[in-house]
Structure formats: C-alpha cells, structure tokens
C-alpha cells in the first residue's frame, strides 16, 4: 500500500510539473510575441544580430531552427528565412555538381545564391549559409562543411571524405592544385597513401588530373578554380537542379 | 550621376569602380580620403546603400570625373546585393589602415599641413557630429534589442531547466507515465526547440504535428512520385514541398520526423535509407528490387554503364541512379570497375556464366 502511495505521489508530481510547464510556456509565448513586435525587423535585416541570437540560443540549449512549428520560427520568422535558404543552397549545389564533383567554396556558393535570390530579396551573410547547411545535414544527402585555409568547402554529395581527404583538400586550397611530392613533403606521407587519397578524389569527380604539367602530374580541384572564373549557371544546369 | 551598372572593387589602398559596359571607364578613390562610412538599409523601391564621407580634396589631387562637388560624400548603391559583405570588408580596411604601412606604385600624398588641417576641420566637424548622434541613436536601438534579447533568453533558460527536471522524473518513473503525458511533453519541447533530454533528438518525433504532416505529405507527394518512377530523394522532397508552400516552411527535421512516421501510419509512402546514408521516399507500390532487374537489362544491353550514363538513359537523378546500381551490385547482379576514369558497372558474369 505504501509503495502504491509513493507511486501515486510520483505521478502527481510529474503532472504538476507538466501543468507548470504548460503555464510557463504560455507566458513565454507572450514574452516572445512582445519581443517580436519590437525587434522582428532587426533580426530580418541585421545579420550580426542574427548571429548573436543564434549564439545565445545555443548557449542555453535551444535550437530555434529545429522545427517550423516552434515558437521562434512562428513568431520571429527565423525559420522561413533559413529553410528557404536551404532550398536555394540545394539547388545551386545540384546545378554545379557535375562541374565540381559536389564540392564548392563558401564564397562561390554565397555568390551564386545571391544571384539566384534576385534583387529584391533579403541579403544573406556567409554565417547564414553555414547555419542553413548545418540543418540540411539531417536530410541524408551528404551535406558537410570542411574547413580549409580560413574559409570552408561545402560538400553536397554522399561521398565519404575522411581526415586524410580533408587534409589534402586543405593543402590544395592554396594554389587550387596539389602534387604527390607536395603531399609527401608537407604531410610526411608515403607515396601510396598520397596516391590513394588523390585517386579517391578523382573518382568522385572532385579532382581533375593534369598530366601535361611540367614536372609531375597536378591534381586540380574544380571547386577552387571555378571561383576565380566565376561562371554563371547555365539554363541547362538550372533545369537539372529543380525537381 | 551617370555612373550606373558597374563593379566595385576594394583593395588595401583604394576603392575602385569599373563600368561593366565600358571597360575603359574606371574611377578610384584612395581609402585615406574616407572619414566615415555608414549603411542605409534597403527599402521599397530603394536599394541598400553605403554612404562614404570624404575629406575635402587635397590641392594636388589627380584629375577625376568631377572638378568639384557640393557634397562631401558619395553614395554606393547596391542594386544587386553584396552590401552587407562589402560594408564589413570596407570597415575592416578603414580600421586597419594598411595603406599607411604598405608602399604603393604611385605615392598619393596626403599632406598634414596644419593650416589646411584647420580649414578642413570646420566642414568635417558638422558632419561628424551628426553622424555621432545618428550612431548613438542606432546604438541605442541595437543595445535595447540586445537587452530585450538577453531578458528573453533568461526566461528561455528557465524553460530548459524545467524540461530537464521533468525528463528526469520521467526517467525515474520508467513506464508509469502515460502516453498522453509523453506526447504533451514532446510537443512542449518542440515549441521551445529544446532537445529531448532523454533521446537527445531535437525533433519531437511522435507529436501530433508530425503525424498530421505525414498525412499531408502522403497527399502532396503521390503524383510527383508517380511522375518520377516512384522514388525521390529527401532533398528533392524538401525543395518540392517548401517551394509549393511559399510560407510557413518545413524545417529539414520536421520533414525527416514526419517521414519516419509514414510506415506506422500505414500511409501509401515510406521512408527508406540506403547504406550510403541517402534517404528517399518511395511509393509503397514501388519495389526497388524489381527495378534492379530492369536496371540489369539496361546495363547488359549497353555492355557497361556509369551512374551518369544510366541516369541519362533512364531519366533519373544521378544520385538515385547510383543507389540503384549499388543495390544491384549488392544483390550480386552487377560488378564494378573502379578506376580513375570513374565507376563503371558490368553485368556480373561470374554469376551467370560459371
């Protein structure tokens, strides 16, 4: 009987707390509405404020972009901003995949997304892009962010890129290409290891081989040199991107 | 001013503008001439701008597009984006003042003549004062926003703490909690964007919202799936659905969560995850293993095919084409030839011809 009483007590406590949470949730919703009425514009227009907002959420353990049904998304409109950006990022990556094997610099992605958004759309920063991409990972398409030389390469295909591949990409970032000798001298690897990594990148279409280079063959990354020439997305490529 | 349609470039020393149509036309301003810059947000019918306030021209200024101007500032109008990044970079350059430490090809002397200095100051002071006031006003707005944000976050933090305590209670009770209470709790977490402390998933899977969403998706996706051979990648679905919605978009997690419920709700679609991690939605009636048989036929006809070639032939996305060929390989019908020229699939003759 005592045990049953304790159990019952336990149930009551949880129920109490749930009721309390429900009440506090309503109160919070009101506070958020007030905040939104005063500062919703600020979030839309000010990328630095967006960064602050996101950082603060992360610190306390809240993800404002988890669901379109969340309060943050509904009342501050942050959701639509990032989810739409996600769609635009996917489309650009798909359109350019055949050129760069599914790797693109953050800079080029930024440029292409801005072009696609048109003149009257809200401006977006690179930080915005990174946050949108982090959310896209859950869709299983292989979205990933690879730090290279002060910026990032964005991966958008389910190719497996481990630490070895990443470090070679970082080495190649400086000149847009890399050779086996460079890998041996900078990373102190055996030739076999270097070749394996480079071959994998070639197979995935992320690297192109220049056998006519003076000296030894050079492995170029189209993701890196397209940025220099900044080509437009052709109508055919755009067609391929939209489902 | 007739300087329309061009490209703006920023170096460590100068701001350069080149006409897009007439490449011969190119004007520049040394960064040392800039007193202050400010942003003007875009509005309806107006593009975002940066206003660049300048020192009066020194007497030995090189000839430029205008001999003189009644304004002490220029406006850069960003009709097609880039204003935010450009403002940030320009601010950096002005703060760093690298032109002072780095020699240039042409030496541009800005003489600090005390006499001229005083004369300059008079015109500038008025501008600087106005800018200071405006900056204080903007700062006040921003700091008020930050203050409000901090207060809001404090309250949000309380919600997080409360949810942790409830989750602990649930864990302790281990099965004494009702289904209903669990669902309620999950929906509270969903509203706040709090990760479920028990499962560590941020998507409150199993909420009513996701159930409804799953049913909606089944309706929306039926036709598109039929048009695409019964199968679509989750990223395709994400784009399709959100483009159609326009507003109140789905988060990627919303989509994944709803799709996870498709099968249990006995809807005519299902979520499938390939070994590679690629996620797709298939019609229940779709049988990928059957499709493999027809894929084998196609490959046999052509002798061998890469994912790209197969995709073009059949009219599928390369991503899904590759998955189908990989599945065929897994089932033993195809063999691969993996070389630097690409991944090519052949009918598995080891199996058929012994």
Image (spheres, rainbow, N blue to C red):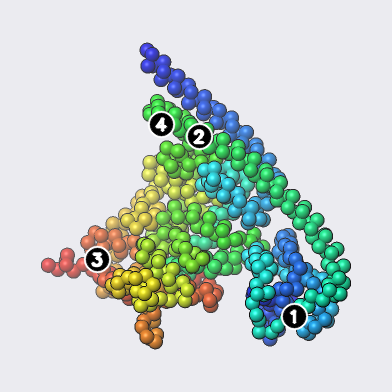
For the point 68% across and 79% down, the residue is: B18
Q: Of residues A167 and A112, which is closer to you in this image?
A: A167
- On what subunit does the disc labeled 1 rest? B
Which residue is tagged 3?
A: B334
Left of A133 or right of it: where is B125?
Answer: right
Judge depth for marks 2 and 1 and give the one in front. Answer: 1
The quarter of the picture where residue A72 lies is top right
Q: Of residues B274 and B348, which is closer to you in this image?
A: B274
Which residue is tagged 4?
A: B171
Left of B169 or right of it: where is B142?
Answer: right
Q: What whole-number distance in Å separates the C-alpha atoms at marks 1 and 4?
A: 74 Å
Verify CB contact (< 8 Å) between mark 2 and mark 1: no
Q: Secondary structure at mark 4?
A: helix
Which residue is tagged 1?
A: B109
- On what subunit does the disc labeled 3 rest? B
Judge depth for marks 1 and 4 and give the one in front. Answer: 1
């Amino acid at each position: 009987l005592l045990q049953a009483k304790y159990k019952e007590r336990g149930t009551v406590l949880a129920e109490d707390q749930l009721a309390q949470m429900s009440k506090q949730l309503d109160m919070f919703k009101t506070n958020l509405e007030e905040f939104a009425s005063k500062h919703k514009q600020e979030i839309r227009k000010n990328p630095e404020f967006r960064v602050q907002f996101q950082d603060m959420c992360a610190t306390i353990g809240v993800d404002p972009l988890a669901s379109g049904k969340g309060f943050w998304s509904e009342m501050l409109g942050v959701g639509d901003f990032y989810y739409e950006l996600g769609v635009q990022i996917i489309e650009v990556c798909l359109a350019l995949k055949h050129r760069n094997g599914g790797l693109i610099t953050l800079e080029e992605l930024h440029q292409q997304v801005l072009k696609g958004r048109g003149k009257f759309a809200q401006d977006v920063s690179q930080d915005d892009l990174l946050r949108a991409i982090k959310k896209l990972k859950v869709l299983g398409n292989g979205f990933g962010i690879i730090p290279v030389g002060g910026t990032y390469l964005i991966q958008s295909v389910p190719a497996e890129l481990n630490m070895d591949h990443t470090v070679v990409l970082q080495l190649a970032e400086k000149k847009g290409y890399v050779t086996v000798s460079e890998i041996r001298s900078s990373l102190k690897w055996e030739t076999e290891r270097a070749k394996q990594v480079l071959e994998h990148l070639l197979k995935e279409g992320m690297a192109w081989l220049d056998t006519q280079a003076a000296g030894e063959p050079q492995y170029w990354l189209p993701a890196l040199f397209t940025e220099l020439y900044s080509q437009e997305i052709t109508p055919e490529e755009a067609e391929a991107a939209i489902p | 001013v007739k300087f329309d349609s061009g490209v703006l470039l920023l170096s460590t020393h100068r701001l350069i503008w080149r006409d897009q149509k007439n490449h011969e036309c190119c004007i520049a301003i040394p960064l040392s001439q800039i007193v202050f810059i400010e942003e003007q947000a875009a509005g309806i019918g107006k593009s975002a701008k940066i206003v660049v306030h300048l020192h009066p021209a020194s007497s030995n200024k090189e000839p430029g597009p205008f001999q003189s101007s009644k304004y002490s500032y220029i406006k850069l109008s960003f009709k097609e984006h880039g204003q935010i990044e450009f403002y940030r970079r320009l601010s950096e350059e002005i703060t760093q003042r690298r032109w002072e430490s780095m020699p240039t090809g042409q030496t541009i002397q800005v003489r600090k003549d005390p006499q001229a200095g005083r004369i300059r100051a008079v015109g500038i002071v008025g501008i600087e004062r106005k800018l200071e006031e405006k900056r204080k006003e903007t700062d006040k707005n921003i700091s008020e926003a930050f203050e409000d944000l901090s207060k809001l976050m404090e309250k949000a933090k309380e919600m997080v703490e409360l949810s942790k305590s409830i989750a602990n209670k649930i864990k302790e009770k281990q099965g004494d909690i009702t289904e209903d209470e669990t669902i309620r709790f999950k929906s509270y977490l969903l509203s706040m964007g709090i990760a479920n402390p028990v499962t560590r998933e941020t998507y409150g899977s199993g909420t009513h919202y996701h159930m409804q969403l799953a049913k909606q998706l089944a309706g929306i996706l039926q036709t598109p799936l039929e048009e695409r051979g019964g199968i679509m990648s989750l990223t395709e679905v994400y784009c399709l659905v959100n483009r159609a919605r326009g507003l109140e978009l789905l988060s990627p997690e919303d989509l994944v969560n709803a799709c996870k419920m498709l099968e249990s709700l006995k809807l005519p679609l299902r979520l499938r995850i390939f070994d590679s991690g690629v996620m797709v939605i298939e019609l229940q009636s779709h049988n990928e293993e059957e499709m493999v048989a027809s894929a084998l036929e196609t490959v046999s006809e052509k002798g061998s095919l890469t994912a790209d070639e197969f995709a073009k032939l059949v009219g599928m996305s390369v991503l899904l084409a590759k998955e189908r060929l990989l599945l065929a390989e897994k089932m033993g019908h195809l063999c691969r030839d993996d070389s630097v020229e690409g991944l090519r699939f052949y009918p598995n003759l080891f199996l058929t011809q012994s």
